[in-house]
Structure formats: C-alpha cells, structure tokens
Image (tube, rainbow, N blue to C red):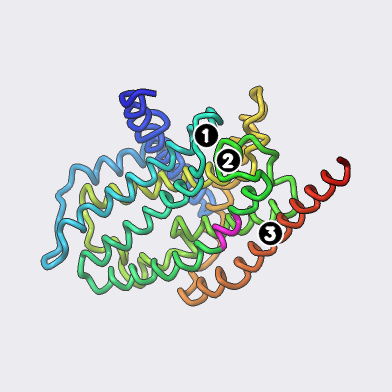
C-alpha cells in the first residue's frame, strides 16, 4: 500500500472523517437516550455537529502563566491517538490480513493517549481546580488499566496471538465463561476510560466546575469534546472486535448485523449506567478497580489458561 493510500485511509475511512462522524452520531444517541430516561424530547440529529462547529468558531483563551505550547498541543495528542486507534481497529475488522504482529499492544497504547492528553492539558493550565482534576485522572487511570489489560489477555490466550487479525478471526471469547466475565470487567473499565458517571471525578462539574477542562475554550475544547465522542464510538467497537470477533468476521450479512447489535447493546449499557448511578469518590473508584474488578479479571485469565492447557493436553493425548 502506497503512502498516499495510507494517508487517505487516515483522513477519510476508516480514519478521521469516518470516526468523527460516527462519534458525533453516537454522542447524539447518548443524549437522546438520556433525554428519554429524563422524559424530555432531546436534541435533533445534527445537534452534536452544531455544537462542535460552535466551538471551532469561538476564540481560544490561553491561561496566563501556563505552559502555552503543551496546553494547546494536548487536545491534538488525544485526537490523533483515537484517530489512529480507530484506523488500526477497522482495518483489522475489514481485512484480517491487513494487520501486523503486536498491533493489539499498539492499539492499547493509542487508546491511553486521550486520558494522557487530558492530564497534560490540565497541569499545563496551572489552574488549581484543573490540577485536582488531573490528579484524579491519574489515579483513575492507574486503577482501571490493570483490570482492562487482564481482561484483554483472555482473548489473547484463547487465540494464541497478539495480532488483531487473529483475534478477530478466532472463535468468539464471549461464548466461554472466562470470556463473559472478562467482558463484564472490560465494560466497567470502559465506563472509567470514558470518564462518564459514575467515574467522572476528573471534571466533576458540581465540584470542580469542569475540572480538567476549566481553562479550555474555543477549538481546543471542541477538540476534547470531539475526542470523547470518538472514544464513545471506538471503545465499544474495540470490545466487539475482541470478544465477538469470531462471530462478526464470518461471511454473510447476518454476522455484521449481529456485530452492530452487540455494539449498540454496549453503548446502551454505558448510557444506562451513566443515568442510573451516582458519582463515586476517587478512593472508592480505585478500590473498586484494584479490588473486585481486578480479582474478576485475574480469575478470567486463570480460567482461560486452564482451558488452554487442557486443550493442549487433550490434543497430545489424541495424537
């Protein structure tokens, strides 16, 4: 593949334009379902696009005394990370051969970049409330990344590969006990990775007046909002690829419908949790992820290893 083709993929499909549009539509679903829960009409379909356009035509205010370069570059770092992650993920779903060994590790790192960008931007602003939000983001990130990686290990063990193409084309882990438990742990981590209720402590509008975003305005704030919408679309796709890949990648249109349904269920579950649970304290979130969620994820890994070893023993016995 030539450099021009790769650039077009990054710019159009399955990169920037596709992920941005899909993310904004997903954010509309989020707001519409939230309105239904609260017995409101909700926004029109194009309202998220109008909101982003509004941010990009407003003035950018830079805090006095802050690290201006890092303050302005941080939103671009997160935006580039989620765009590249979506591009790698969709290439593996559309063509399992168009992947490389270890791309799963690269994808995990890229999905960490939006949170790292928020941390960098909050501390670069030199605002006390933003710094508190940034410290909360660090604690939350340390807490949920461990069980998330453990949950991702279950499909890796069952497929015997860290290549996304192999993971997508292998039997779906969601059909096993360890896969179901790992999926539940990953859903909890996804809620925290999106920093939405009950894990929205870094911005906590009622406590920190926006926290990490308090000094942002104009296009940089719009970039953060767009990145979050893209993450709301990309993370459920990531879980569908890992835990339902063997079913989604099969031939015919029915598996594709099944994959879309699985994605919608994950998004709907995220929205329902957001609207039915209260915000937890930072120490409660840390205890939750490093305690029960990590224990469940570790149990999943042990179950997956036990299944893998039993398959190896049985295969040698039959030989």
Decide which of tag 1 and tag 2 comes sooner along the chain: 1
Residue 40 percent location from the top left of the image:
47, 49
> As rendered, which of 205 and 147 lies closer to the eye?
147
Decide which of tag 2 and tag 3 comes sooner along the chain: 2
- State the image quarter where residue 296 is shown: bottom right
- Which residues are drawn in magenta? 147-151
Question: On the image, numbered disc 3 is attached to which residue?
Answer: 300
At horizontal 66% and vertical 24% (from top left) the residue drawn is 251
Q: Is residue 178 above or below residue 132?
A: above
Question: On the image, numbered disc 1 is attached to which residue?
Answer: 92
Decide: few, some or many residues near mark 3? Use Cα within 10 Å; few <14, some 14-19, many ≥20.
many
At horizontal 43% and vertical 43% (from top left) the residue drawn is 85
* Residue 241 numbered tag: 2
Decide: few, some or many residues near mark 2? Use Cα within 10 Å; few <14, some 14-19, many ≥20.
many
Decide if residue 211 is on the left or right side of residue 218: right
Label 3 to label 1, Cα distance in Å?
A: 25 Å
């Amino acid at each position: 593949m030539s450099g021009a083709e790769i650039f077009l993929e990054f710019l159009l499909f399955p990169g920037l334009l596709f992920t941005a549009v899909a993310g904004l539509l997903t954010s509309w679903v989020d707001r519409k379902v939230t309105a239904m829960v609260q017995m409101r009409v909700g926004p029109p379909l194009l309202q998220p696009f109008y909101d982003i356009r509004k941010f990009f035509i407003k003035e950018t205010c830079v805090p006095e005394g802050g690290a201006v370069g890092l303050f302005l570059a941080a939103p671009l770092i997160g935006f580039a990370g989620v765009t590249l992650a979506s591009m790698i993920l969709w290439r593996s779903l559309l063509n399992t051969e168009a992947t490389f060994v270890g791309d799963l590790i690269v994808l995990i790192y890229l999905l960490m970049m939006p949170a790292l960008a928020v941390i960098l931007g909050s501390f670069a602003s030199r605002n006390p409330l933003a710094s508190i939000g940034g410290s909360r983001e660090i604690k939350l990130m340390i807490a949920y990344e461990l069980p998330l990686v453990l949950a991702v290990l279950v499909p890796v063990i069952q497929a015997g590969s860290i290549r996304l193409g192999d993971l997508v084309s292998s039997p779906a882990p969601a059909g096993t006990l360890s896969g179901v438990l790992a999926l539940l742990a990953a859903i909890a981590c996804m809620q925290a990775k999106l920093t939405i209720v009950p894990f929205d402590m870094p911005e906590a509008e009622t406590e920190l007046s926006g926290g990490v975003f308090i000094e942002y305005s104009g296009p940089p704030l719009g970039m953060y909002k767009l990145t979050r919408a893209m993450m709301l679309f990309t993370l459920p796709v990531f879980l569908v690829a890992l835990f339902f890949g063997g079913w989604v990648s099969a031939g015919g249109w029915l598996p594709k419908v099944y994959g879309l349904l699985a994605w919608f269920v994950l998004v709907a579950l995220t929205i329902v949790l957001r609207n039915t649970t209260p915000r937890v304290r930072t120490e409660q979130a840390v205890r939750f992820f490093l305690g029960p969620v990590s224990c469940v994820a570790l149990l999943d890994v042990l179950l997956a290893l036990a299944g893998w070893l039993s398959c190896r023993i049985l295969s040698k016995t039959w030989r």
